[in-house]
Image (tube, rainbow, N blue to C red):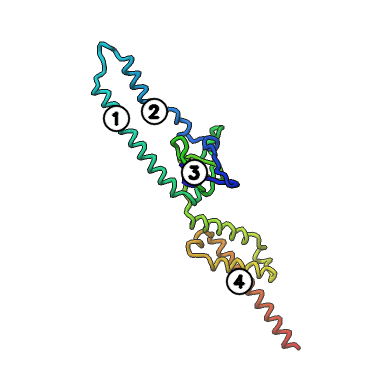
Amino acid sequence: MSIVQAVKDGVLQGTTASQNSLSTSEKSSGSTLDKDAFLQLLVAQMKYQDPLEPTSNTEYISQFATFSSLEQMQNMSSSVDMERATTLVGKEVFMSVTNSSGNTETVFGKVDYVTMENGKIYLSIDDSLYSLDDLDTVVDPDYWKAYNLAIDWTSSLSKLSTVERTTLDNEEAIATLKKSFDEMSDYQKTFLATSSKDLLQAYVDKIAELNDKKNASKDSETETE
């Protein structure tokens, strides 16, 4: 019951979810009482009941009605979970996955498609399936873009020499950083440390100072001539 199924070389791929995700709920799924198991227990109860004090038909009907109601609620919950899972397709998420050693690992990636296997819902991330129960965080696209932009920008800034040692050879790199900063939205700029913004301004001021000295030197040479 896949929303979208992975395709490779024109062939639908059948990835087994149990090989990739060992969530706590998955481990305990064997204890879940389904309809067939309930009916078997009901038949056994009727077969081995005390013939001197037999259970009334009304009680059997009541038990079955209770189970049917519970089953409907579970089906409704499963339907809601599937709807919730389909909204995650195309989004980037963090998953908290319990591996075979019992340790919890964090997996990050984009949800490619959603599938249901043995009554459980799984998200496909980087060609592996993970239980919906392992979902930890859904990342907002604007947040993630701003975060990565801030990381890259700060990294480029840190590669420059100190302000005191800055020369006009660094002018192009500093101009690129300044342009990138100016093109950021106000929201994206909030991801930058104040010290980084101040450092950029110090570099810009230093380049302006060096250019002023360079121009003053040229003017002086022209006057001398």
Q: Residue at x 41, y 46 (%)?
A: 84
Amino acid on which disc 3 is placed: Leu
For discs 4 and 3, the disc positioned in front in the rendered view = 3
| Residue under pointer 1 | 66
The single residue placed furthest to the top in the displayed view is 52
| Residue 78, image x, y percentages | 39, 39
Sequence-wise, which precedes: disc 2 or disc 3?
A: 2
Q: Are marks 4 and 3 in contact (CB under 8 Å)?
A: no
Left or right: 4 in relation to 46: right
Question: Where does the C terminus fall, quadrant-wise?
Answer: bottom right
Amino acid on which disc 4 is placed: Asp
| Residue under pointer 4 | 205
| Residue under pointer 2 | 33
Q: Which sits in the foreground, 85 or 155?
A: 85
Amino acid on which disc 2 is placed: Leu
Judge the density around disc 2: few (<14), some (14-19), many (≥20) Cα neighbours within 10 Å: few
Q: Secondary structure at mark 3?
A: strand
| Vertical order, 179 against 18 (above or below) | below
| Vertical order, 81 against 57 (above or below) | below
Q: Secondary structure at mark 4?
A: helix
Q: Are marks 2 and 3 in contact (CB under 8 Å)?
A: no
Amino acid on which disc 1 is placed: Thr
| Residue under pointer 3 | 123
| Vertical order, 32 against 207 (above or below) | above
Label 3, label 1: how many angstroms apart (C-alpha)? 32 Å
Label 4, label 3: how many angstroms apart (C-alpha)? 51 Å
